[in-house]
C-alpha cells in the first residue's frame, strides 16, 4: 500500500511537471524526470496485481441482472393478473 501511494505521488509529480513544462521558462532536467518515471514503472511491476475492480464489476453486474429478473417477473405477474381481470370483466358483461 505504501509503495502504491509513493508511486501515485511520484506519477502525479511527474505529470504535473510535464504539464507545466510548456509554461515554465526555466530549463527542466529531463533526465531526472525520465529516471523518476522509470523508477515508478519498476515499482509498478513489483506491486501485486489487484483485480478487485474486476470482481466488483462482476458482482455489481450479477446483482443488477438479478434485480432485472425480479422486476421482469413482477411485471409479468401484473400483466397476467390484468389480463385475467379483463377476461373476467368481459365474461361478466
Image (tube, grey):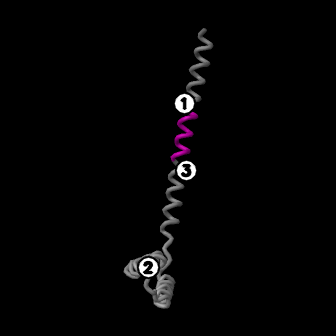
Q: Which residue is mark 3?
A: 65
Dot 1 or dot 2, earlier in sequence: 2
Left or right, residue 36 beside residue 92: left
Task: Where is residue 92? Give x, y as percent.
Answer: 59, 10
What residue lies at 56% left-to-right and 44% top-to-bottom? 69
Dot 1 or dot 3, earlier in sequence: 3
| Farthest-out residue, left | 2
Mark 3 → mark 2, Cα distance in angstroms? 52 Å
Task: Where is residue 80? Give x, y as percent.
Answer: 59, 29
Q: Which residue is mark 1?
A: 78
Mark 2 residue element: loop
Q: Which residue is mark 2?
A: 24
Q: Label 3 neighbourhood size at 10 Å, few (<14), some (14-19), many (20+)?
A: few
Question: Disc 3 vs disc 2: which is toward the camera?
Answer: 2
| Farthest-out residue, front | 25
State which quarter of the image contains the C terminus. Answer: top right
Q: Nearer the viewer, residue 21 or 31?
A: 21
Mark 1 residue element: helix
Mark 1 → mark 3, Cα distance in angstroms? 20 Å
Task: Where is residue 78? Give x, y as percent.
Answer: 54, 30
Amino acid at each position: 500500500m505504501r509503495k502504491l501511494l509513493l508511486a501515485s505521488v511520484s506519477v502525479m509529480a511527474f505529470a504535473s511537471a510535464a504539464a507545466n513544462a510548456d509554461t515554465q521558462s526555466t530549463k527542466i532536467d529531463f533526465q531526472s524526470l525520465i529516471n523518476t518515471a522509470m523508477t515508478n514503472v519498476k515499482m509498478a511491476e513489483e506491486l501485486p496485481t489487484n483485480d478487485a475492480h474486476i470482481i466488483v464489476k462482476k458482482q455489481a453486474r450479477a446483482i443488477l441482472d438479478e434485480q432485472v429478473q425480479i422486476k421482469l417477473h413482477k411485471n409479468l405477474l401484473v400483466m397476467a393478473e390484468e389480463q385475467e381481470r379483463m377476461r373476467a370483466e368481459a365474461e361478466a358483461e
